[in-house]
Image (cartoon, grey):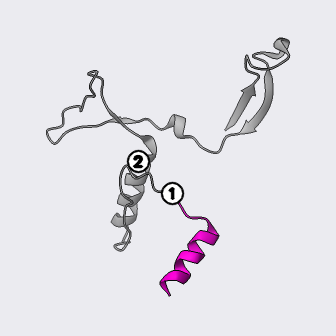
Amino acid sequence: MKKEIKYSKRTKDKSLVGKVKETIMQVSHSKKWKSQKALDNEGNEVLNDKGKPILIKSYSLLQDRFYKYMSDNGYKDFIRGEKGSTAEHLSDIEFKAKKNEKN
């Protein structure tokens, strides 16, 4: 998908504000994935302190669907990552160092 990047108000040349700076190919389509409202066990919307519905993040929904697809197609040793986790991947060097520590 092509996406236009425009000059912002912060540009030094004010005559460029709002004009197309560059056009890029956008790889992620996360903005097109709709978030779903969180539901309780009875199927009612879960609300936050201000009374607004809590949304499930689109990437979490994608991971749930991917896990279900893989499980349904015979990958029984496949596990879903921990929901809501903030864990980050290790770099290659960190992974190899950790692997060597275990050996």
Residue that badge 2 annotates: 60
Answer with mark 1 or mark 2, whichever residue precedes in sequence: 2
Residue that badge 1 annotates: 88
Examine the rendered structure and indicate whether residue 7 appears above or below residue 103. Answer: above
- Magenta extent: 88-103
Q: Main secondary structure of the magenta part?
A: helix
Depth check: 28 or 48 in front?
A: 48
Q: Quadrant of residue 51?
A: top left
Q: Residues within 10 Å of mark 1 (few under 14, many from 20)?
A: few
Q: Position of residue 41 (x, y in %)?
A: 16, 42
Examine the rendered structure and indicate whether residue 82 appears above or below residue 23. Answer: below
Depth check: 3 or 16 in front?
A: 16
SS at badge 1 = loop
Q: CA distance from mark 1 to mark 2?
A: 15 Å
Residue at horizontal 82%, vertical 12%? 14
Residue type, label 1: Glu
Residue 42 vs residue 67: left or right? left
Q: Quadrant of residue 47?
A: top left
